[in-house]
Image: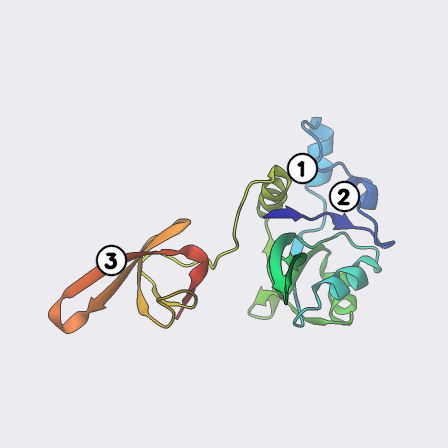
Amino acid sequence: MTASAWPVSASGTATTSAAARGIESPFYSASLPDRAWDRVELMDPWHAVWTRSRHERVVRDAVAALGLEVYLPTVVQWRRWKDRRKQVEFALFPGYCFARFDRGHRLPVLKCTGVVDIVGFDGKMAPVPDHEIDSIRTLIASRLVFDPCPLIPEGALVRVVHGPLAGAVGRLERKGPRSALVLSIEILSRAVKVTVDAADIEPL
């Protein structure tokens, strides 16, 4: 499995924050002088934009048309189509894309076609830390094999949604690419442990 994702300018072409905003980005520059770091701190924060189902690219293009820096990480996977297999590009985080903007751009972003809302808490937009976006970019650029999976804390109750254990409910004991799932009979204080793929479980 391979993946590709790049920021998109208003014209729909790949760009960097330097091209879009005239500010050097620490992701694209190995080192920055002190004055450049001061300017980076003044950049607008990233926000997660919640989109309608399968409207991630529509939202990306609409937000980019506002002149904002937008980032839609994607992953390319093989899918079977009748009698043949085909590579298909999917959003790495279905239903979401990311954009840099301040509070003044909230309403224009919300009015973009396909936008449901901007992720936030208590009615306030929640910024996404730069290092989280940069880490996703670094992973994608590395060409390493990876799979998206839910962020579930150890000890949480989860349900298996794929594979031979689909429908089974247990407690997540160990996180990782291969997670340990504990299935228990509580009144007997007995349990069994099985290994499952991290992408095959969801929180309850």
State how far apart marks 1 and 3 are (Cα): 41 Å
Q: Which residue is mark 1?
A: 27
Q: Which residue is mark 3?
A: 193
Instruction: Point out the residue furthest to the right here.
Output: 11
State how far apart marks 2 and 1 are (Cα): 9 Å
Amino acid type at image mark 1: Phe
Amino acid type at image mark 3: Lys
Which is closer to the viewer, label 2 or label 3? 3
Image quadrant where one finds the C terminus: bottom left
Residue 120 placed where, x, y %? Answer: 59, 65
**Residue visible at 69% across and 48% down in the picture:** 5
Residue 66 placed where, x, y %? Answer: 83, 60
Q: Earlier in the sequence, mark 1 or mark 3?
A: 1
Q: Foreground: 48 or 103? A: 48
Disc on res. 201: none
Disc on res. 17: 2
Residue 193 placed where, x, y %? Answer: 24, 58
**Residue visible at 78% across and 71% down in the picture:** 113
**Residue visible at 41% across and 67% down in the picture:** 203
